Amino acid sequence: MFITTQAPQDEQILKLLPILANASQILLEEYQNYCAGRDFNIDEKEDHSPVTQADLKVNRYLMGVLAELTPDIPVLSEESDYSDRHAWSKCWMLDPLDGTKEFIHERDEFTINLSLIDNHQTIFSIIAVPCEQVMYLGYLTELPYKYSFSQKTWERYSKYKATESDAIQIGLSHSSKNPKYQQYIDFIEQENPVIRREAGSAYKFCMMLEGEIDIYPRFHPTSEWDTSSGQGLLESVGGGLVSLEGIPFTYNQRDTVLNAGFIAYRDKENQEIALEALKNVSL
């Protein structure tokens, strides 16, 4: 949960604030035009995943402003060339529209993900939610902030104390039909009531910060730009995101930008439940 606080005085946060506000507005206007049935271009990438004019428009904007703001820090974006990435010890990681399929299906659970990677670790994270006009942001070593673009108000994360009677809230993608998810939930339900919460994209990480999801299992691949911001924000509040072998993801290090499956958890209490359940899934 988040409680009202004063605006931070951090220079990086204050410089990025209007940039993410503008990017969110661009994406929101694209979404409104798409939902209104106006001309809208959707293409297919080599991996057969969709890419829209909204992805590309937000990408062009953010690539341009980040190059001006931090010319010495390259940007590893889903929608740009990153062939030189292994020469970068520090870089921005960007997904200009995380949840393209949600966007296309007219579900408002899509985000803009931006994170700063240094020596393969996420040290600063932003997830903006255009349709809610908010963003979650912060450093790995500090509790994160929540900012409302429309209200111009700041809030800061506050630890949420669950009671023993609270159900375990499991976050799932809308497309989570793999029977492994049911195996995972069935094991947890032996000891705890379970509430299933379906949502798209990195929006589930925002729900975790809000106390609406406790554990988020993912048994199919993602890419580094899908998880970096969420992992950084979760780790900053005492939660985490680990591979199915229990190891935290590192970034811009492997031969591929694809991730295998993962388990994300909101806090240490849910970490034990999350990883114990994983032992009982046929991977």
Image (cartoon, rainbow, N blue to C red):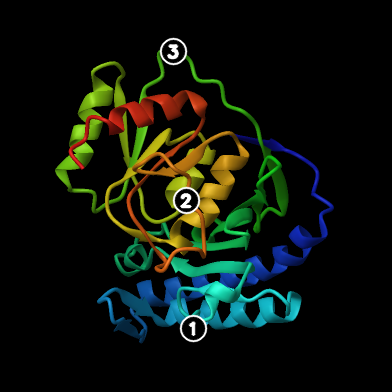
Report which residue position mark 2 lands on.
249
Residue furthest to the left: 179
Q: Label 3 vs label 2: CA separation?
A: 30 Å
Q: Is residue 116 above or below residue 26?
A: above
Residue beneath the point at 51% across and 50% down = 230
Residue furthest to the top: 164
Check disc 3: other Cα within 10 Å, few if <14, some if 14-19, many if 20+. few
Quarter assignment of residue 89: bottom right
Q: Nearer the viewer, mark 3 or mark 2?
A: 2
Q: Quadrant of the N terminus?
A: top right
Q: Determine the secondary structure under disc 2.
A: loop
> x, y percentage for residue 78?
46, 73
Residue type, numbered disc 1: Asp
> x, y percentage for residue 276?
33, 26
> x, y percentage for residue 71?
73, 80
Residue beneath the point at 37% across and 67% down = 103
Report which residue position mark 3 lands on.
164
Q: Determine the secondary structure under disc 3.
A: loop
Q: Is residue 10 above or below residue 55?
A: above
The one nearer the camera, 2 or 270, is 270
The mark nearer the N terminus, 1 or 2, is: 1
Residue beneath the point at 37% across and 25% down = 273
Confirm or deny contact between disc 3 and disc 2 (CB under 8 A). Answer: no
